[in-house]
Image (cartoon, grey):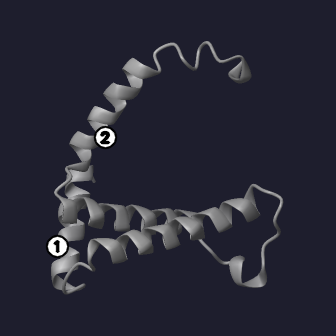
Amino acid sequence: MTIKEAQTTVDQWITTTGIRYFNELTNTAILMEEVGEVARIMSRKYGEQSFKESDKKVDLGDEMADVLFVLICLANQTGIDLTEALQKNLEKKNIRDADRHKNNEKLK
């Protein structure tokens, strides 16, 4: 699935099964909540925190997909073509960071 296809699929789901989009502020709050769930799993799986019994069955991929879903909702609501935005962002990074990381002593 391409990013454009994902945006179309999410929009179709929202306008049928989901009835309508939550407003942008609500979706921003939901996005932060979903990112927090990913952070919790990461801190337990890769960090120093231990899993709680309720966290042992969580699926990191599913939680990341929740983040992506809400991000796509926000892009759809605000008229952002995520394919175009990502392409422009990568172009910016290629120009800005052409030598930045190569010259970073911390990364060697």
Location of residue 45 by image quarter: bottom right
Contact (CB < 8 A) between labels 1 and 2? no
Amino acid type indicated by mark 2: Leu
Q: Which x, y percent locates residue 93?
A: 40, 27
Residue 68 shows up from this direction: yes
The nearer-to-camera label among 1 and 2 is: 2
From the image, which quarter does the C terminus lie in?
top right
Q: Relative to 103, does residue 73 appear above or below in the rendering?
A: below
| Near-viewer residue (33 or 43) | 33
Location of residue 42 by image quarter: bottom right
Q: Which x, y percent locates residue 86?
A: 31, 40
Location of residue 71 by image quarter: bottom left
Q: Is residue 99 left or right of residue 77?
A: right
Residue under the image location 58 percent in, 68 percent down = 36
Pointer 1 local density, CA inside 10 Å: few below 14, some 14–19, many at least 20: some
- Which residue is tagged 2? 86
Q: Relative to 45, does residue 56 appear above or below in the rendering?
A: below
Label at residue 12: 1
| Near-viewer residue (66 or 80) | 80
Residue under the image location 27 percent in, 51 percent down = 3
Amino acid type indicated by mark 1: Gln
Q: Which x, y percent locates residue 67?
A: 44, 64
Q: Which x, y percent locates residue 51?
A: 78, 73
* Badge 1 element: helix
Residue under the image location 21 percent in, 41 percent down = 84
Q: Is residue 8 left or right of residue 54?
A: left
From the image, which quarter does the N terminus lie in?
bottom left
Question: CA–CA distance between discs 1 and 2?
Answer: 22 Å
Mark 1 vs mark 2: which is more N-terminal? 1
Residue 2 shows up from this direction: no
Residue under the image location 19 percent in, 49 percent down = 81
* Badge 2 element: helix
